[in-house]
Image: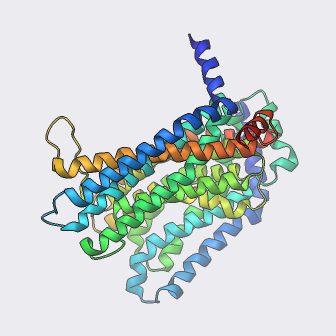
Amino acid sequence: MSAWLASFERECRIAWRQKMDVLNPLIFMEIVISLAPLALEPSPRLLSEVAAGFAWLALLLGAQLTGSALFADDWRTGWLKQIFLSPSPAAVLVSARLAAWWLIGFVPLVLLSPVAAMMLGLPSASAFALLFALLLASPALLIFTALGAALTLGIGRAAALAPLLVLPLLVPLLIFGAGIVRLHADGLPVSGQYWLLAAFSMLSVTLGPLAVTAALRLQLVD
Amino acid sequence: MASRFWTWLHKKGSPPVFYDMADRWAPWLGWLSLIAIAVGLFGGLVLAPTDYQQGDSYRIIYIHVPSAWMSMFVYMFMASMAAVGIVWRLKIADAMALTAAPIGAMFTAVALTSGAIWGKPTWGTYWVWDARLTSELILLFLYLGYIALYNAIEDERTAARAAGILALVGVVNIPIIHFSVEWWHSLHQGPIEINLTEKSSLQPSMLWPLLTTMAGFQMLFFWALLRRTQTLVLTKEIAAKWVKRLMESKA
């Protein structure tokens, strides 16, 4: 546990210092959102209907950008070797890294999404439903993004490949999550959907670090 | 007992032994599958009665249902082979997982296109964003992702492991994807209940050709799998003595 905390603190500090890696996805997400009115038409009625869906899409795509930064320097700095040499299990250290990235990289993205959706005319009453849904979904989103990044770490063209692997796996998240705002707007109960999102995130958080660690271990084979 | 099992497994998994075994099995599978598909299609396209609602267009199920079923079966097969490859480091399992992927992708593509062709006269549209269509499409993406990852990594063992992890994550996710999409929207027919002992929801005269083509597709898959794996093993082990001996004996 103390190894986890120490590692978590270190990872937070490093992530915080790589400001561009944190900022780029945010800017990217805003750009995707501002393209929506251009691609569809700037009618407030239409936009407010698709706002939540677009916010979800923008978040999923924006999260893909963080992936390429997630383990980028670790080969060079020796972190990849050290986690497997360390007396604490590698999965623990990997999960500390993931937790730090969730806090520094994903929480701002999630916080920005409802704002972006409101730019498209999402009623502010629905914004909280959206925010809560995204927050519940974000751990799973991070785990899958990290898995994609870890699997494609050794490849030069990784940046293009990882989203291809990850996005199809995120379908349940999108389905459970994106429906929430619609249901909420119709005044229907949404707690079931929240539980489903939470369950999916829980499953990913339990099994995910093991899978990510297994994928990272592959880099050491040769 | 256990140790004897492992010796047996590793012996069967060694490339030359596998190659010989595949050579013996593949012709049987190939011919049987050809006969089963031919008989099944004759039964389905000629003998089976016309459907009172859909007319003759329903007959596409004799292609559509077997390929949709195979698309899922092959993914499960591929993931189990990947798991065996990761856990027991069996080369032949890795090879089979790799060779199964394009076959599975083909079955998925056939299921999607045959469904679209059937959908036009029946639903009035080639494509709807319906639950099963969507999850089948995602299955196709999972196959393509697997193949892309395998091809992108140069080192063969790393590629097999990485793609294997992806296949396993996919297999955990497939039921979730399936149910999530199911709850989302569904326009697709309810599943045909195939019940061999009691009364099935499909007429016997329509059912037996379907079961026959399904068996045929199953054998077709294993035939293609064995042949493709043989080719892969040959190219991988091109420098090995047994390949040289084999080539000389065939020449």
Frontmost residue, A121 versus A218: A218
Determine the image quadrant of residue B145.
Answer: bottom right
| Rendered residue at 45%/70% (across/down) | A53
Query: In this image, A74 relative to B12: left or right?
Result: right
Query: In this image, A45 relative to A157: left or right?
Result: left
Frontmost residue, A134 versus B71: B71
Colour pattern: rainbow
| Rendered residue at 23%/60% (across/down) | B46
Query: In this image, B216 relative to A218: left or right?
Result: left
Would residue B195 be visible to someone looking at this image?
yes
Query: In this image, A176 relative to B228: left or right?
Result: left
Q: Quadrant of the C terminus of chain A?
A: top right
Residue at the extreme top of the image, as rendered: B1
Q: Quadrant of the N terminus of chain A?
A: top right
Frontmost residue, A113 versus A159: A159
Q: Position of residue A124 (x, y in %)?
A: 42, 72
Q: Position of residue A27 (x, y in %)?
A: 66, 73
Q: Is residue B175 above or below residue A17?
A: above
Q: Is residue A170 above or below residue B100?
A: below
- State how many labels appear: 0
Q: Position of residue B226 (x, y in %)?
A: 57, 42
